[in-house]
Image (cartoon, helix red, strand yellow):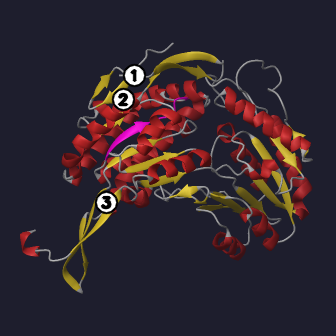
Amino acid sequence: MLEKRNFYINGAWVAPREGRDLDVIDPSTEEACAVISLGGQADTDAAVAAARAALPDWMHADPADRLVLVKRIGEIYAARADDMAQAISLEMGAPIDMARTSQVGAGAAHIRNFITAFEQVRFIEPLGDHAPDDRIIREAVGVCALITPWNWPMNQVTLKVIPALLAGCTMVLKPSEIAPLSSIIWSEILHEAGTPPGVYNMVNGDGAGVGTQLSTHKDVDMVSFTGSTRAGIAISKNAAETLKRVHLELGGKGANIIFADADEKAVHRGAAHCFNNSGQSCNAPTRMLVERDIYDTAVETARHLAETTATGPAHQTGRHIGPVVSQAQFDKIQDLIAKGISEGARLVAGGLGRPEGMNRGYFVRPTVFADVSNDMTIAREEIFGPVLSIIPFDSEDDALRIANDTVYGLTNYVQSSDGARRNRMARHLRAGMIEMNGKSRGAGAPFGGMKQSGNGREGGIWGIEDFLEVKAVSGWDSTAD
């Protein structure tokens, strides 16, 4: 069992004022690996009050000083990389090699990219030559509640904390109670970096407790939330009472459209992407739309990949997927696999239960369904597990219709050697991100969705701007600058 750390408020580790203890479960073993305290209203109030008191000085600090702090955070994060990887692997089940590369690496990349993007921010600039005495001022939104999920802990924490710091906001972070250990290490990093007291605070808690307290708090100016669409709707309703700014990164049901002229690795690449992180990614390409001419071959390729994808404990080195994060998540995935079978989808790999030889841990068999219709539950709901649904299509228009027939709009994928067709698809697909022919988005590209996948954009200059207000000033005295 790891040593229990409490809350980080006003520059110090403090004991909870109220609340209860909660076991953190290792999903590879189903055993408790740590204990945390869940905060209550008094803890939330103390953290928000610290952030509110620190806001004036931090908001009006020299932006160059805020940049120096973020650079220092990046250096210490790199030095603590293995500690962070061990924590992520233990708390949410990412295989340790993946935790060291993709999981920890995502946070490091975001810190670097925000440092680069910060050069583009103009906190005071002229409106234009036509209005020489007008200025546009960008200033911090204020006190921000940052509520992050368990599936990519440092990816999401850095996407929120770093731009908020650079913008001049103060904040309260509430990490997922399922995977809080990485955020405790993150808080240690910010403390070591010399973050001024009250600028950054962290309180553990669940959504119904600290999450609701933050989203309804009168002294919180903005909520940035990543998680389920259901929770995002609840947060929006709570925040409406005080007209907070709300930034939501929610679920997805990505369509991966594979045309007959796609490269020979397209199906393998798409299925592997679906299974990555045990399927626990909001931008996973979980609906594979395949042109009918190559449909049977694609199903066979996906079946082979699923049957050769190894599963294993998170602490084990090597190329495999780990468990899903919790009993609740395991049960949900099993229910949806059963629903796919009962609704008539053809199960070609995987299925119900744990992989062969495993009787403990939240391990799910990499699963492939073929002959899925887009009205089936497994094509409509976000499963958040290693489950791929393959759907045939007959034409470009047919593919577009199926892909856009969803309440979600996060990431879609296109595989084709026809550049003109790729461009047409990119323009007509209703999603915040389109990735084509296996090419990932470039550094600093915005991350975010449409429809019930949320609003706002994270990453790059867009991610910083989400934490800034815009003020129009006339009558500016340029001689006093």
Of 476 and 276, nearer the camera is: 476
Of 403 and 338, nearer the camera is: 338
Of 309 and 394, nearer the camera is: 394
The x and y percentages for residue 35 are 49, 17
- The residue that mark 2 highlights is 43
Q: Amino acid at mark 1?
A: Glu
Residue 273 visible (yes or no): yes
Q: From the image, state whether disc 1 or disc 3 is nearer to you.
A: 1
- Label 3: which secondary element: helix
- The residue that mark 3 highlights is 119
The x and y percentages for residue 176 are 51, 34
Using residue 65 as the reference point, say whether residue 357 is left or right of it: right
Name the mark on residue 18.
1
Q: Amino acid at mark 2?
A: Asp
**Could you say which quadrant of the image residue 335 lies in?**
top right
Give me the residue at 89% from left, 63% from top: 292
Q: Residue furthest left?
A: 480
- Label 2: which secondary element: helix
How packed mark 3 is, by other alpha carbons closer than 10 Å (few <14, some 14-19, many 20 or more), is few
The residues tagged by marks 1 and 2 sit, at their Cα atoms, a distance apart of 7 Å
How packed mark 2 is, by other alpha carbons closer than 10 Å (few <14, some 14-19, many 20 or more), is many
Write the start and end of the magenta stretch as one range.
170-178
The x and y percentages for residue 226 are 52, 46
